[in-house]
Image (cartoon, rainbow, N blue to C red):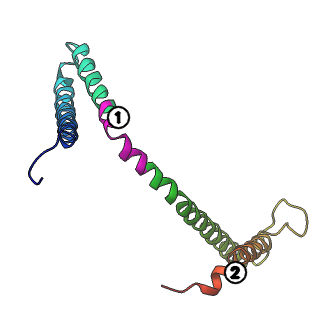
Amino acid sequence: MPGVITSIERPARNRGRRSARARLLVHVGLLATVAGTLGTLQLLHIRNAIHADVGLGFASLVIIHLAQRRHRIARLFGQLKRLRGAVLRELRLLASDAVLALLAANVIVSGIIDWDRGYPTPLPLPRPFDRWHLLSSVLLVLYVLAHVSRRRKRLKRSAIR
């Protein structure tokens, strides 16, 4: 019958109201204990115990608040796990681009220094790796080859945005 509330529906609605009231009380308690903790800061030179007690009350309410929101927190962690793979891929690509930029800058700087001096800058390494510009150029070419070979499938379908 429309308009008639059965006994099955009533407890679910009361439970929802109780949990909403409990969440409201925890939020009010959190606000009150934050205000109390901040308010007792000026009393630290008199009684440190008051500030510590109010702070412990706040910490207890934080634990209760997190327990009340455990399903939402679990869902957020699940979303973070799914995003983790994409974020790690982007970070690896960013790190690779940074290495390429540093190697290219090294080649440019070593070339300018060699050009300014009029002769290759020596390094304390065995031949043929004893010249700074030559070594940095070889490293750059090897890294570019590795970089491109790992991304050759994506290079075919990539677009400039």
Q: Residue at x 91, y 67 (%)?
A: 127
Q: Amino acid at mark 2?
A: Arg
Tell me which label, 2 or 1, sits earlier in the chain: 1
The span picked out in magenta is 64-76
Asked if the residue at tag 1 contacts the one at tag 2, i.e. Cβ–Cβ closer than 8 Å, the answer is: no
Is 127 rendered above or below residue 19? below
Could you say whether the residue bearing mark 2 is in a helix, strand or loop? Answer: helix
According to the picture, the residue beneath numbered tag 1 turns out to be 67
State the residue at coordinates (20%, 43%). 9
Give 151 or 123, whichever is nearer the viewer.
Answer: 151
Is residue 104 positioned above or below 13 on the image? below
Q: Residue at x 34, y 31 (%)?
A: 63
Q: CA distance from mark 2 to mark 1?
A: 48 Å
**Which residue is disc 2 drawn over?**
152
Tell me where residue 111 appears, x and y as whole percent: 70, 77
Q: Quadrant of residue 39?
A: top left
Residue 135 appears left or right of 79: right
Residue 71 in the image: state x and y as whole percent.
37, 44
Q: Nearer the viewer, mark 2 or mark 1?
A: 1
In the rendered image, the vertical position of residue 54 relative to residue 144, given as above or below: above
Residue found farthest to the left: 3
Type of secondary structure dominating the magenta stretch: helix
Relative depth, front residue between 45 and 15? 15
* Residue density around tag 1, few if under 14, some if 14–19, many if 20 or more, within 10 Å: few
Q: Mark 1: which amino acid?
A: Ala
Name the residue at the front extreme.
1
Q: Secondary structure at mark 1?
A: helix
- Asked if residue 66 is among those painted magenta in the image, a careful observer would answer yes
